Amino acid sequence: QSALTQPASVSGSPGQSITISCTGTSSDVGGYNYVSWYQQHPGKAPKLIIYEVSNRPSGVSNRFSGSKSGNTASLTISGLQAEDEADYFCSSYTSSSTRVFGTGTQVTVL
Amino acid sequence: EVQLVESGGGLVQPGGSLRLSCTASAFTVSSNYMTWVRQAPGKGLEWVSVIYSGGSTYYADSVKGRFTISRDNSKNTLYLRMNSLRAEDTAVYFCARDSGYAFSDYWGQGTLVTVSS
């Protein structure tokens, strides 16, 4: 049950697009379309922003999009805004019926 | 409005036990998959355990054999019994509703567990 690998930090200027990667194995990310992404502001509970690789819950901005290729999933934030500054975590279902989170990425808006 | 409220956190000595509770509103715990996730201070999220609507349970290797997830249908409450606690179990523990497709759409505010002598 090793954590999925994410870059520790990603930054961008307002209006730019950034992409966060999430790399696992064929036993988790690569094996299932059950990858989700969460946004977490300091001191707050995580918030679901993408589920099943590329679906957005109601109320989540369409600036957030998700995709997957092989064992790597990606979250793209387009039109970066100051409010997007937060930590982002990916998660996947695993072949053991457990779940696993990514190591987390801190997004900074320059 | 869906709401999850955790309680039961606190300071406990190494080797001690604690039971966390998570009371749900506006949906039925027993009809849903429910999960516990923890976050050590300044660290990332770590998945801990899930209970399926049918009663099956699964655990992270780091807590297997020490933690037990359960629910009380009459109280619409999810529990996490934690035994043989270690310093590395210190974290904020969140309960969340798991969709059944391994994503959590509703989260509680978390309860802090500190394991220290």
Image (cartoon, coloured by chain):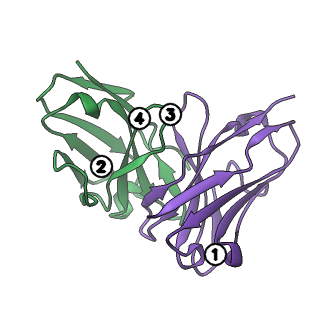
Q: Dots 3 and 4: beta carbons under 8 Å?
A: yes
Front position among marks 2 and 1: 1
Residue drawn at x 39%, y 27% as measured from the top left: A8
Q: Quadrant of the C terminus of chain A?
A: top left
* 3D distance between C-alphas at marks 2 and 1: 28 Å
Which amino acid type is marked by label 3?
A: Gly
Answer with mark 4 or mark 2, whichever residue precedes in sequence: 4
Label 3: how many residues lie within 10 Å, few (<14), some (14-19) or many (20+)?
Answer: few
The chain coloured green is A
Reading the image, the residue beneath label 1 is B56
* 3D distance between C-alphas at marks 4 and 1: 32 Å
Q: Chain of mark 3?
A: A
Q: Give the number of the disc on residue A43.
A: 3
Q: Judge if badges 2 and 1 mark residues of a common chain.
A: no
Q: Dots 2 and 1: beta carbons under 8 Å?
A: no
Q: Judge if badges 3 and 2 mark residues of a common chain.
A: yes
**What color is chain B drawn in?**
purple
Front position among marks 3 and 2: 3
